Image (cartoon, helix red, strand yellow):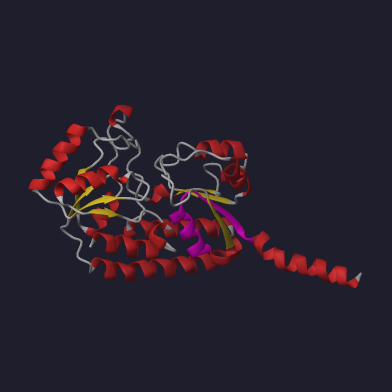
Amino acid sequence: MLRIIVALFALVLFTAPADAAVKVVATLPWIGSLAKEIGKDRVTVTTLVKTSQDPHSIEARPSMIAAVRRADLLIYNGLDLEVGYLPILMESARNPAINPGNAGNLNCSVYVDPLEKPATASRENGDVHPLGNPHYHLSPANIKKMAIGIGERLAKVDQANAGFYRANTARFVAQVDHKMKEWKGRKLQGKRFVAQHRFFEYLAADFGFRIVGYLEEKPGIPPSSAHIQALVSSMSGHRPDAILSTEYHDRTISGFVSSKTGVKSVIVPHDVGANGSRDWFSLMDSVIKSLE
């Protein structure tokens, strides 16, 4: 009998910290990485989208609904990147804590000044995001704002550990500033690239390079032969430094254009987990190296 009581006590003792941890659900790997960096052992993080998946075309699944139903804090990219699945998850989960306006709902894009916000949006113009370009996470300037926002929200959801989250946030921001000095020394300023998708605009703004053309004639829509021919002609006359794509994009077109122009095609790591990256810092190390 004594052994049973001791065993039950040990079970409670060792499971209590996990139960007490803030349950965070992040839509994208980079968001989950930041939440873990700031929350450490005070949080458990479930990430809904895999690195190998195209974040524009995710479908809601029962496992996602179950995760959102249990969440204390839902953190997402915003700018309509998750519009195809997140509203379904939130409605199906019936978890008031993560509803918009509550402390358990954090839209990271509220900390961003969106680029490329169209005056009007129409499906005829392709996969245009009416709220602006949602691919802001490769910008160190933006990621510092995200980190501060996540830290403050964790402090609000879990007030007993507020100081812990704020201290971790301060360390994260200081590391971004330190790494930025290294990355700025890699001399990307003035380089010219052609991109497959409008994925690199915030990165370009932070590091001073230019996107001078796109393989996609319209965002998210395969280009016409006429567009590719015109692009090949333009690139042959004014050679960019590289063609930029990501691992979830079809490489057929970038390979074809590269073969016709002699301009190298580069697969840029797009999120944490790509190219073996373990966190946002190692992701950015790989991104900067790929652009050199």
Tell me if 171 is positioned left or right of 213 in this view: right
- The spot of residue 162 in percent (x, y) is 55, 64
Q: Residue furthest left?
A: 237
Tell me if 150 is positioned left or right of 249 in this view: right
Residues in magenta? Answer: 21-39
Magenta-span inclusion, residue 262: no
Q: Quadrant of the N terminus?
A: bottom right
- Image position of 227 with respect to 153: above or below: above
| Residue beneath the point at 60% across and 58% down | 22
- The spot of residue 26 in percent (x, y) is 51, 51
Quarter holding residue 45: bottom right
Tell me if 63 is positioned left or right of 52 in this view: right
Magenta-span inclusion, residue 37: yes
| Residue beneath the point at 19% across and 38% down | 228
In the foreground, 214 or 190: 214
Is residue 197 among the parts visible in the rendering? no
| Residue beneath the point at 22% across and 63% down | 292
Is residue 23 among the parts visible in the rendering? yes
